[in-house]
Amino acid sequence: MEKIKMQTPLVEMDGDEMTRILWQMIKDELLLPYIDLNTEYYDLGLKHRNETDDQVTIDAAEATKKYGVAVKCATITPNKARMEEYDLKKMYKSPNGTIRAILDGTVFRAPIIVKGIEPCVRNWKKPITLARHAYGDIYKNTEFYIDKPGKVELVYTSNDGEEKRSLVQEFKTPGVAMGMHNMESSIESFARSCFNYALDTKQDVWFGAKDTISKTYDGKFKEIFQQIFESEFKDKFEAAGLTYFYSLIDDIVARVMKAEGGFIWACKNYDGDVMSDMVSSAFGSLAMMTSVLVSPHGYYEYEAAHGTVQRHYYRHLEGKETSTNSVATIFAWTGALRKRGELDGNQKLAAFADSLEKATLKTIESGKMTKDLALITALENPTVLNSRDFILAVRETLDSIM
């Protein structure tokens, strides 16, 4: 068959460890045989980030602004151990955090539902979509180690010379301190993205923060959400039969565990990072969740909502077989290809993305799956496939439906 042409390149951000291995397998077996793949490539592997002093991450984000759609492989955010392992010049910040700060917008994550994989939470009947604020907080923090007695203060100096100062802590022994921030404009974009996405997908919105403790920081999130809802979305929600509900984050968590699903759970940046892993795992697997950053400026960045699968990578380096679930990474590619096709009016490209997703789910529903899914499937006698063989099985299914 003739390969599908692409008018505009995708921004392709390669990553680290086992997901980097899967990335190439997916391209070789599921994309390149069918698409004349057109990408602008950026290597966000930790080694190359170190070589470029992390400039490559900034360049990739700027390219996403230029072309509008990006697809990203999972990457390492280094800690002290990783710094030593990779002989890094410094402990670089999260590449996702850097990219999200440049693009702004909201990260929407939703579980990939497949027959035979039942949620751990028995009352979850419908998908729960996590809306993660994609700016600031701990991902754009400043922090340091306190090695001797003294005081840490939070200081603000305005351009006209006004100064505000607040004591954080009087240190008598060693400790750590951190400062983080957010912007009203970003919180407003977050709120509007959530409410607009809710109207598009016909889902209620739940939002939780800790304004009883963080009266200024979290309190501002609560205030902005309520103001924007009342002034811009209340009538639209009522007409669509939808609701917006705010409560403390711990109350929201308790309610989510007893709910049926079918709503958008809006979370601050850190909350969304953690809770999306909980939701995806409870729905089946960390590798069974889509993730897309939607910017109010019209930029889209698709990725898997999980990490680099470090343990499997070390097995791979030892020449041992792995059974790593590649579904979310496949869906990152299909999401980006579909959006690229929609923006370019390329129906063949968008249709191919639909077919690849269908083939992936059909392969699992036929009983062929990776070990993580085989351990929890309701299907009898599943066939456990290694990392490569699962991708090859998807290709076989794809060929049968194309």
Image (tube, rainbow, N blue to C red):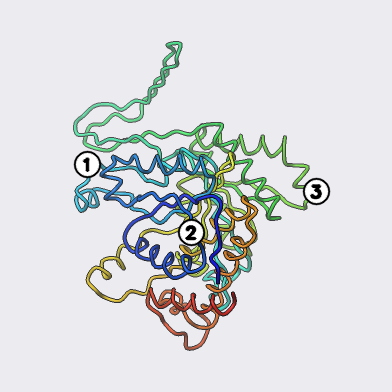
Could you tell me which residue is drawn at 49 percent across and 38 percent down?
213
Which amino acid is tagged 2? Leu
Helix, strand or loop for disc 2: loop
Q: Position of residue 379 (x, y in %)?
A: 52, 84
Could you tell me which residue is drawn at 35 percent across and 43 percent down?
56
Mark 1 → mark 2, Cα distance in angstroms: 34 Å
Give whichever of discs 1 and 2 has the lower sequence position: 2
Classed neighbour count for the residue bearing mark 2: other residues with Cα under 10 Å, few (<14), some (14–19), many (≥20): some
Which amino acid is tagged 3? Ala
Classed neighbour count for the residue bearing mark 3: other residues with Cα under 10 Å, few (<14), some (14–19), many (≥20): few
Could you tell me which residue is drawn at 50 percent across and 50 percent down?
9
Q: Quadrant of the C terminus?
A: bottom right
Helix, strand or loop for disc 1: loop
Determine whether, in the image, residue 46 is placed left or right of residue 226: left
Mark 3 → mark 2, Cα distance in angstroms: 43 Å
Q: Position of residue 17 (x, y in %)?
A: 31, 60
Q: Quadrant of the N terminus?
A: bottom right
Determine whether, in the image, residue 144 is placed left or right of residue 61: left
For mark 2, what is the residue?
37
Q: Is residue 249 visible?
A: no
For mark 3, what is the residue?
239
Q: Answer yes or no: do the residues labelled 3 and 2 have beta carbons within 8 Å?
A: no
For mark 1, what is the residue?
89
Q: Position of residue 168 (x, y in %)?
A: 35, 29
Which is nearer the eye, 354 or 94?
A: 354
Which is nearer the eye, 79 or 291?
A: 291
Give whichever of discs 3 and 2 has the lower sequence position: 2
